[in-house]
Image (tube, rainbow, N blue to C red):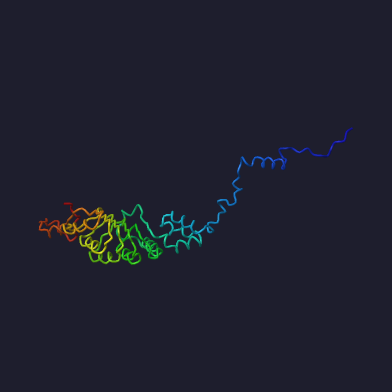
């Protein structure tokens, strides 16, 4: 009678060493994501180089940087606060700007002021909603402003306001007014105090009084790309021009301008 051996016969299906050898031999055909030194869930975003962070934040809309992207960690916040070049060209335009009135909300004004303050006087371009108070703040804090694009409705108060504003922006080269009211004396202030102005687009605006031929000629001789508002007058302007207006049209509130 033979003696049965006590040595166990290993089942290849449950042999851990054989399974390990098979995995090692097929490692070139299969790559496990755990083999990478840093998986996506373990990336230390705060340890990224400053220039890499700058590129990342420059690709994020600036409104989102203020709302949350600049608060990811301490290093991101320092860069968003202390890097003026990140705010050299400010763009806070939104799709609903053309539907807003000329008085932006307090929250939006605070956000816009924060971007201008972070530019530390180096802001060269601004695009977004404005009102008179913010425009004066922008002109005071951004003397090197070269481009101003107003995306909301804005009615210039008077020629005196525009003269004060234009004197604070001697470097202005481009001005775009999407909607609102601008008077001929405000246009004259731009000619007198913005010698570098090369583009003036006010085609979406309107005027209470027609632009004189002298003023139009001065604008055309000084500004290369000029788009003036269409000629419009209201009842008050028609009275000054000697045109008889029906009594029903002489209300205290001026009616909407009529195209000539």
How many numbered marks, from 0 up?
0
- Residue 234 on image: x %, y %: 17, 56
- Left or right relative to 16: residue 98: left
- Residue 193 on image: x %, y %: 25, 64
- Left or right relative to 157: residue 111: right
At horizontal 23% and vertical 61% (from top left) the residue drawn is 191
- Left or right relative to 151: residue 32: right
Q: Which residue extends farthest top? A: 1
- Left or right relative to 76: residue 115: left
At horizontal 45% and vertical 61% (from top left) the residue drawn is 80
- Residue 198 on image: x %, y %: 27, 57
The N terminus lies in quadrant: top right
Q: Answer above or below: position of 170 versus 224.
A: below
- Residue 99 on image: x %, y %: 31, 54
Q: Which residue extends farthest right? A: 1
Q: Answer above or below: position of 173 versus 18.
A: below
């Amino acid at each position: 009678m033979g003696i049965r051996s006590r040595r166990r016969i290993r089942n290849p299906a449950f042999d851990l060493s054989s399974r390990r050898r098979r995995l090692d031999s097929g490692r070139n055909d299969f790559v496990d994501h755990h083999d990478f030194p840093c998986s996506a869930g373990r990336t230390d975003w705060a340890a990224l180089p400053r220039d890499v962070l700058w590129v990342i934040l420059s690709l994020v809309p600036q409104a989102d940087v203020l709302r949350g992207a600049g608060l990811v960690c301490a290093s991101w916040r320092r860069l968003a606060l202390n890097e003026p070049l990140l705010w050299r060209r400010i763009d806070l335009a939104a799709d609903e700007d053309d539907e807003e009135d000329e008085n932006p909300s307090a929250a939006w004004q605070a956000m816009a002021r924060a971007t201008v303050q972070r530019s530390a006087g180096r802001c060269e371009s601004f695009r977004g909603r404005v009102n008179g108070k913010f425009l004066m703040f922008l002109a005071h804090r951004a003397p090197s402003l070269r481009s101003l694009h107003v995306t909301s409705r804005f009615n210039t108060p008077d020629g005196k306001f525009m003269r004060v504003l234009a004197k604070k922006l001697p470097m202005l080269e481009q001005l775009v007014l999407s909607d609102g009211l601008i008077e001929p004396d405000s246009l004259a202030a731009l000619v007198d105090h913005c010698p570098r102005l090369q583009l003036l687009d006010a085609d979406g605006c309107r005027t209470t009084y027609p632009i004189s031929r002298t003023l139009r000629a001065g604008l055309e001789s000084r500004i290369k790309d000029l788009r003036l508002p269409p000629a419009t007058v209201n009842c008050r302007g028609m009275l000054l021009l000697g045109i008889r207006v029906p009594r029903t049209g002489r209300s205290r509130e001026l009616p909407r301008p009529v195209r000539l």
